[in-house]
Amino acid sequence: MNKPVDTATLKALDRAHHLHPFTDLSGYARDGGRIISRAEHIYIYDSDGNRMLDGMSGLWCCNLGYSQPAIVEAVTRQLGELPYYNNFFRCSNQPAVELAAALVKVTSERFNHVFFTNSGSEANDTNIRLVHRYFDLLGKPQKKQIISRRNAYHGSTIAAASLGGMKAMHEQAIGLSYVHHINQPHCFELGGEHSPEDFGVAVARELEEKIDELGEDKVAAFIAEPVQGAGGVIVPPESYWPEIQRICDERDILFIADEVICGFGRTGRWFGSETYGIRPDLMTFAKAVTNGYMPLGGVMVSDKLADVLLASGGEFAHGLTYSGHPASCAAGLATLAIIEETGVIERAATALAPRLQSQLAALADHPIVGQVRGLGMFAAVELVRDKATRERLAPESEAAVYCRDWANAHGLMVRQTGDAMIMAPPLVSHPEEIDELIALLTRALDATAAHYGVRGS
């Protein structure tokens, strides 16, 4: 156990020495933040003893909450047996071997091979390497271009950030020249007067138009999240994915499904690809594969690619020191066992998700709510001043930041993305805890409406 240190000392050290991700560094150095000291079930506690309902499952990763001793025991046992060895030089380790087999068991029959990484970012870097190597071996070295979507999130390395479509990230990093972007299927933001069905088809066909623009013989792959998570829980219209799948199939374009957020039960099935009936050639995973207890990511590689990679000679010149780390893979094995043995995905899909989505849907009548959207165990609430015109409450997403901060200060950890409040509670939440989340969120919306002078009709 960590030696106790008083909160004031911790906060001073934090401000003085710790550079935080996705943070206004000068603002944090000036004002500081909270120190999270412990967690249990679906609640986190700061060093001052304040309790918060974690409505974000950590960072979309603690699907099973914070009280899973079987994962702790598996990691502890593995650290006592083999704390580390690499998977280079024709070596492997038992947890990595067993986890690869376990992942093959719970994914589509097209997937029989796994490449392990430490994170989703590295997994998406790996996808680029796999795609380019595949087409090189097929004698099509010109197929290097990759198409993604604006406002997508695929990680934070230079390559993964290039695949993503976050404007702020692109402004601070030089993007890869062979990555291109089309519009996201965000009907509220971009659909105008179109029906969701018509908009879904139209925005999907932007992929076809981009392929024609770049040249089908030069385009290698399309990458997308089944539901865009960090971009604001963008749930596509039902017409979107069938059209995307048709285009990829007809145009010899590989499809990469980024399941880092959607995977392991968030959409109501093991993977978002299952929920939408799509057939990816590569599938990125991370986060909930270890319930957030240890860093681990990877790529599920379909037989279409694996058969070519395995049949051809020569080294695949890519790897990571901690690929297939034994302790991380032990955590993954324990996590998958809990999911399978407890039926948590099915229970969340039938008992919790309808409760979450129905109560959130009722918030559509709130004076500052322009749209509620969600699927399974995640959702977003879009904030507006005027429902008809979709005018925002304040510039620069200021109102959503206010709403988030109010919620955080009053016991609810939710996130703000643009003008939306987003949430993804653990799959092990109790029904009354879903009610608690909604009640706290409603209070935050009420406080935000009052702060910006918006009254109910």
Image (cartoon, rainbow, N blue to C red):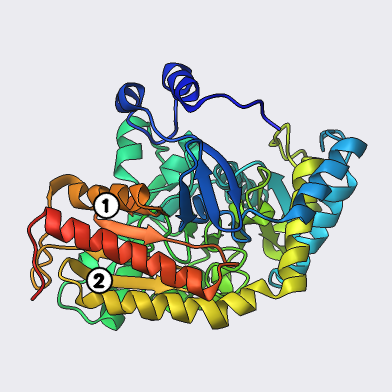
- Does dot 1 land on a helix, a strand or a loop? loop
Q: Residue at x 23, y 82 (%)?
A: 195
- Image-quadrant location for residue 389: bottom left
Q: Residue at x 70, y 34 (%)?
A: 320
Disc 2/disc 1 C-alpha distance (Å): 13 Å
Q: Give how far across and how far down residue 280 sits, in percent.
A: 58, 66
Q: Is residue 314 above or below residue 443?
A: above
Q: Which mark is residue 268?
A: none
Q: Residue at x 21, y 66 (%)?
A: 190
Q: Is residue 127 above or below residue 300?
A: above
Q: Residue at x 52, y 71 (%)?
A: 267
Judging depth in this view, the residue of 249 and 79 nearest the camera is 79
At label 1, which amino acid type do we have?
A: Gly
327 on left or right of 137: right
Q: Is residue 308 above or below residue 296?
A: below
The answer, for residue 277, to whether it is visible in the render is no
Pointer 2 residue: 371
368 on left or right of 289: left
> Which of the image's four quarters has the C terminus?
bottom left
At label 2, which amino acid type do we have?
A: Gln
Q: Give how far across and how far down residue 427 sits, in percent.
A: 57, 67
Q: How many residues crowd mark 1 within 10 Å: few (<14), some (14–19), many (20+)?
A: some
Q: Give how far across and how far down residue 375 sits, in percent.
A: 44, 73
The answer, for residue 382, to whether it is visible in the render is yes
Q: Give how far across and how far down residue 306 sits, in percent.
A: 73, 57
Pointer 1 residue: 418
Judging depth in this view, the residue of 78 and 356 nearest the camera is 356
Point out the residue furthest to the top here.
16
Q: How many residues crowd mark 2 within 10 Å: few (<14), some (14–19), many (20+)?
A: many
How many dots with numbers? 2
Mark 2 vs 1, N-terminal side: 2
- Does dot 2 land on a helix, a strand or a loop? strand
